[in-house]
Image (cartoon, rainbow, N blue to C red):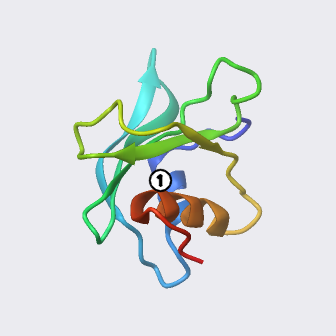
Amino acid sequence: MSKVVTRTVFKNLITNSNGLLPDMVNFKNIKVNGVVRGCSGFLRYSNGNYVYVNTEPSCLSSLSDKILYRSAKNEKDFTGGENHYVKPSFKQKHDFDLQRLLAEVAYGRSMF
């Protein structure tokens, strides 16, 4: 990923145009040897469902610029559901495709 997606960058990407966002639970920057490489944590939606997110770049070149996300049972579930990947868009202030995909995992259906 050419741009490091820190906790603050990710929060800006998923905040909708109304300023609303899911609760960010245990969301922390990932540091390796003092260098921030991304962030990880859980999003808690209004229905009580969780989505685990990790923005650290993968060593696999086909996934290196993508964000990992998957459903989770709670904020301690690091094995969760099926892995999904999405390439974030930094072209606008908010990434509506990323918001939609995360909400689909949380609510189990298309939200838009």
What residue is shown at x 30% (from left), y 59% (from top)? 49
- Left or right position of 42 against 90: left
Q: Residues within 10 Å of mark 1 (few under 14, many from 20)?
A: few
Please, which residue is most extreme toward the bottom here? 18
- Residue matched to label 1: 8
Residue type pointed to by label 1: Thr
Q: Residue at x 26, y 46 (%)?
A: 73
Residue nearer the viewer, 12 or 86: 86
Seen in the picture, residue 32 relative to 26 is either above or below; the reply is above
Q: Residue at x 56, y 70 (%)?
A: 110
Give the percent coordinates (x, y) of residue 46: 29, 71
Q: Position of residue 106 (x, y in %)?
A: 41, 60
Q: Quadrant of residue 108?
A: bottom left
Picture coordinates of residue 50, whole percent (x, y): 32, 53
Q: Is residue 51 visible?
A: yes
Q: Write the residue at 28% across / 69% down.
A: 47
Q: Secondary structure at mark 1?
A: helix
- Rendered location of residue 77, percent (x, y): 27, 36
Q: Quadrant of the N terminus?
A: top right
Q: Is residue 66 left or right of residue 36?
A: right
Q: Considering depth in this image, is 13 or 32 the residue closer to the camera?
A: 13
Could you tell me if residue 12 is visible in this image?
Answer: no
Report the side of 70 relative to 28 (left or right): right
Q: Is residue 75 above or below residue 97?
A: above
Which image quarter holds the C terminus?
bottom right
* Residue closest to the far front: 109
